[in-house]
Image (cartoon, rainbow, N blue to C red):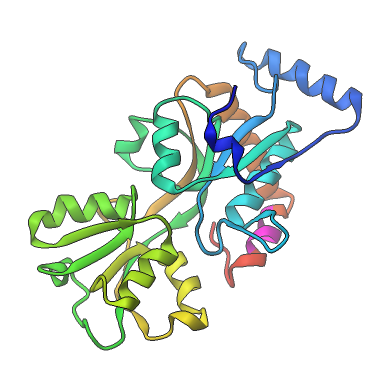
Amino acid sequence: MRGGLWRGRRWRIGFVPVMGAMVAGILSLTAGGEVLAAEPLRVAVAPAFGFGAVGHDGRLTGFNVDIARALCEEMAVPCDIAMQPFNQLMDRLAARRDLDFVVASVLRTPERERAFLFTDRYWRSSSTFVARTGEIQRPLIEAGAGKRVATLAGSRQQAFLRDRMGERASVAGYATDGDVLDAVRRGEADMALMATISALLLLSSEERHGLEFVGDPITENGLGGDVAIALPFGREALRDRVNQALRTILLNGRYDAISSRYFPFRVY
């Protein structure tokens, strides 16, 4: 029986040909003894502009959603794809229940490698500060001293700020990247620290004019690097199959086709 996560928005890949389903089932039993396709794989994505959203037709859309669909199709397994805030789905993954893998722009860090399995990278990340236009000129982390800083709840940016700034800054977590920037725009926060590509996409939207980048993108201290698909420990066979599917879409052009729908440049 599935938990509440799977009662919300979902998208299932179905395979009609009976023989194809039989083959997929047989393969699932031979991958290191791990049953991979006894039922639809449970996949989670997080709401983020350009990466995960619910379209006007009720279907999930976004870069991470389309990557998840492509991987499931390449593996020839049915998948239920559901959306949940980042911090909640990571808690579920850590508890090793309800989720088979997460395609939610999870930055691969040494700390997270002690908690989860990871695939190869599927894009590269950096972080950036954002503030109201003309209000903050200093790009260094010290600019956050005494400030209210907004981040995505459960993100590496939030953990970094709390570790580095301590009580010298007030760090608040929000459910989505859009909420993070809106907190700055409304004056609830003085600045934001977030993934550069998410900020770039959001700042191009008309309703978020009046905000600007502060300083250059940051990659050190775990604020940038490889973004990968996260799985619970014990799912090594599934990780290997996801990696093979990822290599396939990188080679056959499907990855680039997905990327070009959402970004003006290749993010891999």
Q: Position of residue 228 (x, y in %)?
A: 48, 44
Q: Count the marks.
A: 0
Closest to the observer, 104 or 220: 104
Q: Position of residue 243 (x, y in %)?
A: 59, 36
Q: Position of residue 137 (x, y in %)?
A: 21, 83
**Image quadrant assignment for residue 188:** bottom left
Farthest residue to the top: give it. 33
> Quick check: 28 left or right of 99?
right
The range drawn in magenta is: 255-259
The vertical placement of 113 against 25, above or below, is below
Asked if the magenta segment contains residue 42, the reply would be no
Closest to the observer, 216 or 80: 80
> Quick check: 92 left or right of 133?
right
Q: Position of residue 119 (x, y in %)?
A: 51, 37
**Image quadrant assignment for residue 143:** bottom left
The quadrant the C terminus occupies is bottom right
The vertical placement of 71 against 254, above or below, is above
The quadrant the N terminus occupies is top right
- Please tell me which residue is depicted at 72% across the width and 55% down the height of the picture: 253
- Please tell me which residue is depicted at 44% across the width and 33% down the height of the picture: 92
- Please tell me which residue is depicted at 38% across the width and 44% down the height of the picture: 87
Closest to the observer, 192 or 264: 192
